[in-house]
Amino acid sequence: MKWLVLLALALFIAAVLIFLFGKPSFSEDQVVLELEGPTQASVGDEAVYKVKYGNDTKIKLHGLRFKFTYPEESVVVKDGQVVKELTESFTIEELQSREHEEKEFRAFLVGDRGNIKNAKIELEFKVGNLRSSFEKRKTISTTLVSVPVSLTLVAPPTVVSGQVINYILDYRNESGENMSDIRFEFSYPDGFTIQEQIPKSSGINIWFLPLLRRGEGGRINIKGILDGKEGEVKTVSVFLKRGINGEFVNYQKVATSSLISNPLLGLDIFANGSKNYSAHLGDHVEYTIRYKNNSNFNLIGLNLEVKPEGEMYDFDALNTEGGFYDSSNGTILWNAAVVSDFSALPPNKSGEVKFSVNIKDIFPSGGVGERNFFVKAAVKLRTPNVPSGVEGDEIVATSDLVTRISTQPTLSQTAYYNDPAFGSSGPLPPKAGEETLFTVHWQIANPGNDMSNAEVRVVLLPGINWKNVVSVGLGQSEPTFNANSSEVMWNIGVLPQGTGVLTPKYEASFQVGIKPSVAGQTPILVKDGKFSGTDSFTKERIILNAPDLTTDELVDRPGEGTTQ
């Protein structure tokens, strides 16, 4: 009998051990969930995300529910159609032990340079006979490091309610290829009333560009009145949209904000009497700062501070006109000691302060396409003496002015008799009744901003014959001759920044022939030479005139052009 009790006890202990240690083990760490994708991308790139999942436990998983969240503002295209939902779910009934799978998700990333875009995968699942559910999640971040189209959206940082303001969008195609079906869509803040648009939009907030060529750009200027309560932040945003399968989808975004400021003080700044002055190399720029007490209070102890910013300023020529220039922080200061109004500014009293500085006479060196050239003056007028009944620790007004600097291209027009490439033909000095060939050379440099619609034209007078022999630099268009107007035209199109400084000059040459009939004359080879183009940044139309070129002004044989 005793041995039966011992046997039963042994069987019971064995059953307990089998129950506790004989069944398969489970560890949540052995459930694999990984999310792979790019850590850096350009705006508009298609990001590919891979979700990898697996079961490294000894137990079957079941009821797996996955939820993938695309990055904010991204564009998802499924079966040729844009999907507005930015989450996608799928389920798997069972995942066997040691089974691994993966799934791919794609999205076009939308935003601005420097934005961080996060994608996320979430998993909920059950294990064996356990009633409770388990969860896992993974996230990956992608930094937008570059943009195919540079977008600069400018708005005044502070605005008095009811003030007329300008929203300015500058854009340029930096992608290296032509872009088609582009649309800019503005989102205005509440309280903004449009007065003028340059150029006109389709509706009130949409600008359509059928084609934006490589290196080309433009500007959209929207003028209007902004109303709001003091302290409100008014944000304007612009989406660059591209056509995909007949639908315009978000591709790139830029935004900026204005603060509705304390209206007690009015402040503005002008360059050479204008808000839209475009400077040139070597210019003398006189800034005028205008201030006004818009309140019913007597404002005392005012201080004015200006910070000129930009590598194109020549501070050796700075004239502060009584202000103190602090070179440690690059600011100019005026107080009541030099401006009597700042001691006590009565209600509705206005005045102005001036300073001047030169623009440097050369552009700085740097990488190709590195930047556009401009200078900025930011001004701030403030007093810590706040009248009774007015909230805040100080009264302050701010304003700033960006002055764009136009490029300064050069055109060199020369002629050869014995050209290094084409050689020579005919007598020199020219002889009546005999033809002599000459080669005209054009060289163009552009140290500043990109130029668009660039071209060179000259006129061939009667007796000067186009020989249809031309030569240009690699990838450049050739000069052509219009017999109806007797013009030679070189249609360059886009003339990049840094041409002739960071990269070789643009160069073209062509041959002309003359067969004089009268001795003792010096024929004009080309007349009314002119280079023209538009600065893509300042929008200024630039024209250079070249002097007429005669047979007596040859590079290799000067003074031998009089016909015999």
Image (cartoon, rainbow, N blue to C red):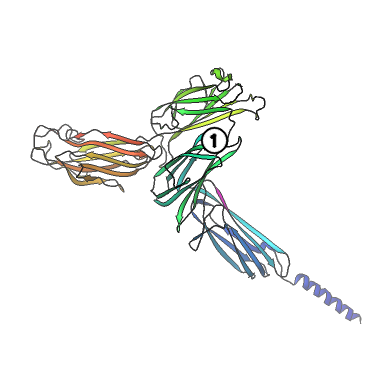
x and y percent of residue 500 in the render?
A: 34, 39
Q: Residues within 10 Å of mark 1 (few under 14, many from 20)?
A: some
**Quadrant placement of the C terminus:** top left
The residue under label 1 is 157
Residue 118 image point, x, y percent: 58, 52
- Position of 83 compared to 358: left or right? right
Q: Residue at left 71%, top 68%?
A: 25
What kind of residue is marked 1? Pro
Residue 192 percent coordinates (x, y): 53, 40
Asked whether 200 or 480 is in front, the reply is 200
Query: Is residue 197 highlighted in magenta?
Result: no
Q: Is residue 329 visible?
A: no
Main SS of the magenta part reads strand
Which sits in the foreground, 502 or 348? 348
Total of numbered circles in the picture? 1
Magenta region, residue range? 115-119
Seen from this angle, which residue lies furthest bottom? 1
Percent position (x, y) of residue 158? Answer: 55, 34
Q: Is the residue 80 above or below the residue 400 in the image?
A: below
Quarter of the image for residue 490 reads: top left
Residue at 49% over, 63% down: 79
SS assignment at label 1: loop
Q: Is residue 273 left or right of residue 107?
A: left
Q: Is residue 93 visible?
A: yes
